[in-house]
Image (cartoon, helix red, strand yellow):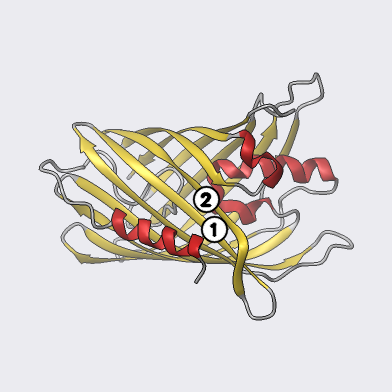
Amino acid sequence: MSRSVRWRVALLSILIAVPAGSDPAAAQPAGEFMTLDRADHESRAGLFFGLLHIEDSDVDEGALRLELHGQHVTPSGLGGYIAVPIHMIVLNDGGDDETALGGIELGGVLARGLGPGQEVALRAGLVLPTAEGDDFQEFLVSLFAVQARLTDIVQAIPETSSLRLGGSLLGSVPGLVYRVDGGLDLPLFTTLEGAEIDHEPVVRLNGAVGLGLGLGTLAFELVNLLVTEGEDGDFGDRSFTNAGVSLGVGLASLRVQGGFFLSVDSVLEEDADEGLITFAAGAATSW
């Protein structure tokens, strides 16, 4: 295991070992942090908005991700979900703004309680080949904007269908909510003429912990992507990380969130040293 992988695993271990406070963190269900998986026992519909700022570049006016998402889960814990991402680049050089539809994702959810306030959630989904990429500009739109939710990067692969599998341990203890995700994304096929698919799986290893603050929850979130490469499937240098903080406020069935995230290791290698900052906002209603 490489050094970069080891420190990420260690940090996730620290996240779930943080000592509990004295007040319940009830304002934010453990199932929904801003940049992690959303699968849990709760039915909800929501909107996510992410603005990626890249310093000293032609897109520092913003790369936007707008996502409609929802899931419905029955009392038995079985359900389904959908996510519809739309990506946009706002240029600062007087050029035309570009918009591209991302890969629409459909899937199923199974949530099971493990004890008071604790549960495990499994999901299996399929990204449809709807991500626009007939020309290089459309591809760049999605590649930039998807980094507002790095864990969903396969939704930016042009006209490609991918299998997504995931499992999560989530819940709450007095004063805290937490979530740990593990998952695998595997590109299956493409409808893009003349394109070839590298069937290299993307491994996701994410974690978050939130501290209850009255009506709100202040959370730290960490997203890691590890891309296998080569015939032996080893992890190479292709690992990407986003980290940041979010604040969620719950009022009855409505929850509003905002967050600030940094790209520690970026997919956009040439721009990684220039600073990639995501400002995110979201709202969801549950039933």
Is 106 placed above or below 198 here? above
Is 243 placed above or below 236 here? above
Farthest residue toward the front?
3
Name the image quarter holding residue 97: top right
Reading the image, the residue beneath label 2 is 241
**x and y percent of residue 149 in the render?**
54, 45
Farthest residue toward the right?
194
Residue 101 shows up from this direction: no
**x and y percent of residue 153 in the render?**
61, 52
**x and y percent of residue 229 in the render?**
66, 70
Is 82 placed above or below 6 here? above
Farthest residue toward the top?
94
Q: What amino acid type should be assigned to the residue bearing mark 2? A: Thr
Reading the image, the residue beneath label 1 is 225
Going 32% across and 57% down the picture, which residue do you hit?
A: 41
As drawn, the label of residue 90 is: none
Going 24% across and 41% down the picture, which residue do you hit?
A: 211
Q: Earlier in the sequence, mark 1 or mark 2?
A: 1
Is 276 placed above or below 166 here? above
105 and 246: which one is in front? 246
Labelled pair 1, 2 in contact (Cβ < 8 Å): yes
Going 44% across and 64% down the picture, which residue do you hit?
A: 6
On the rendered structure, is 29 left or right of 174? right
Number of marks in the rendered image: 2
**x and y percent of residue 39 in the render?**
40, 57
78 and 163: which one is in front? 163
On the rendered structure, is 10 left or right of 55? left
Residue 81 shows up from this direction: yes
